[in-house]
Image (tube, helix red, strand yellow):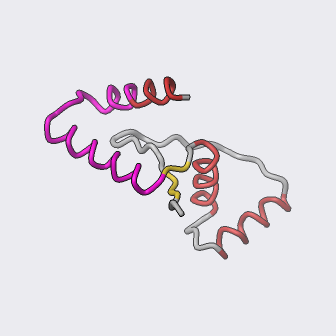
Amino acid sequence: MTEKLKYQLVSIGTMNKQINLRLPQQLLVTAQKYSRKNGYGNLQEFITETIREKLYPEITREELMLVKRLIEVSDKHNLYGTEEELFRKLRDVQTKTN
């Protein structure tokens, strides 16, 4: 069996955006209970993780290790310029594979 992991793209050095979200009362109460029961620090963490799960595909541990190794080599040899250029290249690759 291959273990699957979730990943996220994290932008370092940029400000997160705040949004307002309206939920029906019962959905809000249920989400708050779920987030407390499942160890989320707050409802915002639960909602953020839920969005990530919808947006980003699962990857295997081997794929994650390969990505980490790629980052190490890229850092060591300065194979990319700015963070923006790196994420643009990653998005281009993702678009071509989808």
Q: Residue furthest front?
A: 1
Viewer-side residue, 89 vs 44: 89
**Residue that appears at 58% across and 55% down:** 49
Position of residue 51 relative to residue 4, above or below, is above
Say which residue appears at 33% left-offset and 30% top-offset.
86
Q: Is residue 93 magenta?
A: no
Front residue (pair 67, 23): 67
The boundaries of the magenta stretch are 60-89
Asked if residue 50 lies left or right of residue 73, the reply is right
Magenta span has 76? yes
Question: In which quadrant of the rendered image does the N terminus lie?
Answer: bottom right
Residue 82: quarter of image: top left
Location of residue 90 with respect to 55 vertically, above or below: above
**Percent x, y of residue 35:** 66, 68
Residue farthest toward the bottom in the current orientation of the protein: 37
Magenta span main SS: helix
- Give the answer, above or below, for where 52 lies relative to 44: above
Q: Residue at x 64, y 62 (%)?
A: 43
